Amino acid sequence: MTKQAPLASEPRTGGEILVGQLVAHGVRHVFCVPGESYLAVLDALVDVNVEVTVCRQEGGAAMMADAHGKLTGEPGICMVTRGPGASNALAGIHIAKQDSSPLIVFVGQIERGMREREAFQEMDYRAIFGQAAKWATEIDDPARIPEIISRAFHVATSGRPGPVVIALPEDMLVEKAIVADAPRYSPIDSAPTKAQMADLANLLANAKSPVAIVAGTRWSEQAVKEFVAFAEKFELPVAVSFRRQMLFPADHRLFIGDVGIGINPALLKRVADADLVLLVGGRMSEMPSQSYTLFDIPVPKQRLVHVHPDSAELGRVYRATVAINASPLAFTAELATLPTPASKPWAANNDAMRQSYLAWSDPAAIKTPGTLQMGGVMQYLEANLPADAIMTNGAGNFATWLHRFHRFTRYGTQLAPTSGSMGFGLPAAVGAKRLWPEKTVVCFAGDGCFMMHGQEFATAVQYNLPIIVLIIDNGMYGTIRMHQEKNYPGRVSATHLQNPDFKAYAFAFGGHGERVEKTEEFGPAFDRAVASGKPALIHCLIDPETITPTTTITKLREAALKA
Ligand SMILES: Cc1ncc(C[n+]2csc(CCOP(=O)(O)OP(=O)(O)O)c2C)c(N)n1
Ligand SMILES: [Mg+2]
């Protein structure tokens, strides 16, 4: 039963004030698992035009909200209950922190008067999330809700975006106050100076083999467009950082691949041999930097222009020749002001690197053991998916198929945790489909990865979200088995998995299921999954020997035993 949401000029409960702020800041979606600790907020949500998605586990809810933040640049909103709910949500909070995505997590809290007694499910949120989140706080006075929520939106989206955790004492949420709503937030930005842009132009004018690496968040479709135009003007080869493929179109002649796990050796050499690196938006952390070996620390031998929205990241690990404190949005907006270069001596070598990328990312060239060839699956998807299909994944060797062989060509088509968090793919797909029901959303999951948040398939069914999930089943935690075979050959420990029949699982939940054991079965199964109009699981059984696109368990073991 809905009633009119109360006006800001009337006495409102803490719950009503809070929901009033969400509306004021433009929130349209909330992802939650309910708890008796924040009933007043749940009640206030009844009267406003906000879509509430009730989830099956708080980690999944936080990941759905994180996906929302990644796709829109606006904070995803998650609500969870105290203690156990907050603990589960940490999985998603960690992703938002490492991935620099805007997220606000509201947590129910015990009554103010019971604090410090270790009351039922009591937690000190400032202490526990103080390091995990960008900011963790608690609201004691309903009259201060507009101030604190306004700050939360700014903290989550400004500088390097990240997660904010806000605890809400239960009795505070039912106390009344008269307080005005805050106006809608607007992220804080800083732009490059004229002198910095002149330095960049000068470095480019004197470079012999420059390369650009695009990374991080605070991009947009427009920012990518502006960066493409800049790359064209300078004939600058562009790579993307680990799991940031959507930041430059893979079908562009200047795109040369991703600097991540399992990097194309030719690309690694190209970046290592560059005399100028333009790093936009990223931190060049452990994965893209090849465990901090790609650039010397603290002073890289390449000249480095580092653009980052958080000044604390500039000079944190790498001393840049020119450090520019700006978001990719603000930086790309200035790129058109750079003068046309007199010469581009590197341009003649660009095609060789592009050809290397094309060969590296050609699934037709890959042959693996067994009757189901993932190369064939990728060929089918590349030929049949719409360009704006959103691709999601968690963590595991299976993700290589997506990241190496899928040609991401549009901004807003990738949800991939740089934090390497298993289980992210399914909730991310649910979050994306809830936001944009008209888009095709495909999740890549391993047999291990899927089961981490597999219960959210019920959420997809509940909200009628026809996502398509590929479960790439090798009967093991394959990534860890790969490391075992390399380091402790033949000594398999805690990596074998006995899996359910995922087709039956899909039908039991009210979705559509398929089982694929041969390459030629995949296309028709995928088409039936789409035609079903239901959330679908495609159980792809691959040969357990197929541990990566290019090697087998046996080969890894033999090589390790010889070493
Ligand atoms: C939440 C979480 N737990 C554990 C790990 C460590 N880990 C990384 S990959 C992996 C195995 C993934 O297995 P699966 O999803 O089946 O993919 P596969 O490697 O077999 O393709 C594990 C356990 C992790 N990254 N995240
Ligand atoms: Mg597996």
Image: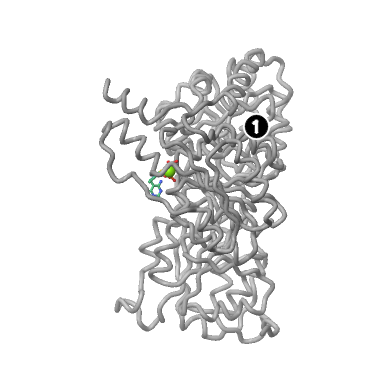
Along the horizontal axis of the image, is 48 left or right of 504? right
Neighbourhood count class around disc 1 (C-alpha, 10 Å): few under 14, some 14–19, many 20 upward: many
On-image quarter of the N terminus: bottom right
On-image quarter of the C terminus: top left
Q: Secondary structure at mark 1?
A: loop
Against 501, residue 357 (above or below) is: above
Res 435 quadrant in image? bottom right
Q: Position of residue 451 (x, y in %)?
A: 44, 54
Res 309 quadrant in image? top right
Q: Which colour assignment does the render follow?
A: one colour
Q: Residue at x 63, y 33 (%)?
A: 379
Q: Position of residue 51 (x, y in %)?
A: 65, 68
Q: Is residue 534 visible?
A: yes
Asked whether 199 or 526 is in front, the reply is 526
Q: Residue at x 52, y 43 (%)?
A: 540
Q: Residue at x 60, y 63 (%)?
A: 461
Res 216 quadrant in image? top right
- Assign ligand 2 to one image quadrant: top left
Q: Is residue 393 visible?
A: no
Confirm or reject: label 1 Cβ below 8 Å from ligand 1.
no
Q: Amino acid at mark 1?
A: Ala
Q: Residue at x 54, y 81 (%)?
A: 40
Q: Position of residue 19 (x, y in %)?
A: 61, 74
Along the horizontal axis of the image, is 121 left or right of 529? left
Q: Which residue is mark 1?
A: 250
Against 250, residue 173 (above or below) is: below
Q: Position of residue 69 (x, y in %)?
A: 59, 55
Asked whether 92 or 516 is in front, the reply is 516
Asked whether 471 or 358 is in front, the reply is 471
